[in-house]
Amino acid sequence: MAKHPPAPPLSDAPLAPGLYLVATPIGNLRDITLRALDVLAACDMVLAEDTRVAGKLLSHYGIKKPLHRYDEYAAVRSGPLALGALMQNQRIALVSDAGTPLVSDPGFKLVRAAVAQGSAVWPIPGPSAALAALTIAGLPTDRFLFVGFSPPKSSARRTFMTEFAPVHATLIFYESGPRLRASLTDMAAVFGNREAAVARELTKLHETCIRGTLEELAADPRLDGPKGEIVVLIAPGEEVPAGADDADAALTEALARMGPAEAAKQVAKALGLPRRDLYLRALELKDVR
Ligand code: SAM
């Protein structure tokens, strides 16, 4: 790995106390902001999902800092350590192995606890595989939903995916190489033959983005046993105007949990149908029940 000289500091202003959520590269080591380097160079301590990965990044930029592991296991120990240091007005940087911390990565509990104790929390924005993939997929970007990883077993995965079928937004999944083919097959079964894209190894040597329908992608030989890190994106489904059957099904389901007025309100919001009509129908359905 070629070494780059550390970037010149952008500002001589001292770094304010607090917890810094520092985004790091998702492959190409030059995808790090000058501000991220400033913060890493000036902070008192770095919390890292994997101290070896973070250690390599820091040494690449000539930065030496006390490193503490912060993952779901080490959080029991390093969480209180970090919170105590924040109370003493220290500056702590949290990094994950790649991309933006907390995005399918640890840190949420720490941020919550830091906020609860009144410590400052600062974002240091930068790469994230989800957004990088979204920008090149050629799918609608006006509304998107980050799903993250789906369950490893096919039956649980299909159940999980079904929840997102009615969502009118581009869906963003994280996936691993060995599971890709089975996942695409399940996606085609659950979402139908929608447009989709598979973005792999973004910003790295073997970067690819293959676009097609879910059925085409599930059968594409270029996706046979692909190694590497993958984002799958799925276009929103066609918006079909809700009909009487949909309304009845939604009302029946809602009436099992709430009264007719609230059921009508919720179904009206979900299906975009007139609330008054739904209320009258809910009363009828309630009598039948
Ligand atoms: N925090 C990271 C972020 O902001 O994107 C995500 C961490 S998550 C544990 C790792 C997953 O992100 C991988 O399994 C893959 O699905 C996706 N990913 C990370 N780097 C990637 C890359 N260079 N190309 C494609 N997907 C990537």
Image: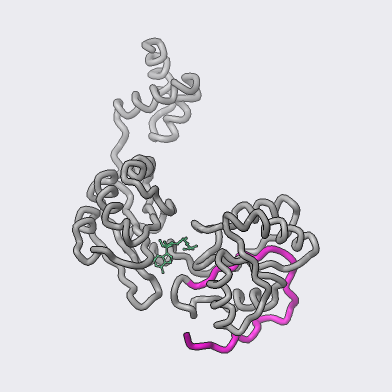
Residue 223 among those drawn in magenta:
no
* Residue 214 in the image, given as x and y percentages of width and height: 24, 54
- Left or right: 256 as drawn, with respect to 32: left
Give whichever of 233, 219 is nearer the camera. Answer: 219
Residue 20 among those drawn in magenta:
yes
Give whichever of 246, 26 is nearer the camera. Answer: 26
Residue 166 visible in the picture: no
Against 93, residue 59 (above or below) is below
Quadrant location of residue 211? Answer: bottom left
Q: Residue furthest top?
A: 287
Q: Residue furthest right?
A: 88
Quadrant location of residue 219? Answer: bottom left
Number of callouts: 0
- Indicate the quadrant of ligand 1 in the picture: bottom left
**For the C terminus, which image quadrant?**
top left
* Residue 16 in the image, given as x and y percentages of width and height: 74, 69
Against 139, residue 190 (above or below) is above
Against 65, residue 139 (above or below) is above
Q: Which residues are magenta?
A: 1-25
Coloring basis for residues? one colour
- Left or right: 33 as drawn, with respect to 121: left
* Residue 81 in the image, given as x and y percentages of width and height: 72, 60
Q: Residue at the location (49% across, 80% down)?
A: 30
Q: Residue at the location (43% across, 54% down)?
A: 148
* Helix, strand or loop for the magenta stretch, by majority: loop
Residue 160 visible in the picture: yes
Q: Residue at the location (53% across, 88% down)?
A: 4
* Residue 165 in the image, given as x and y percentages of width and height: 34, 43
Give whichever of 81, 237 is nearer the camera. Answer: 81
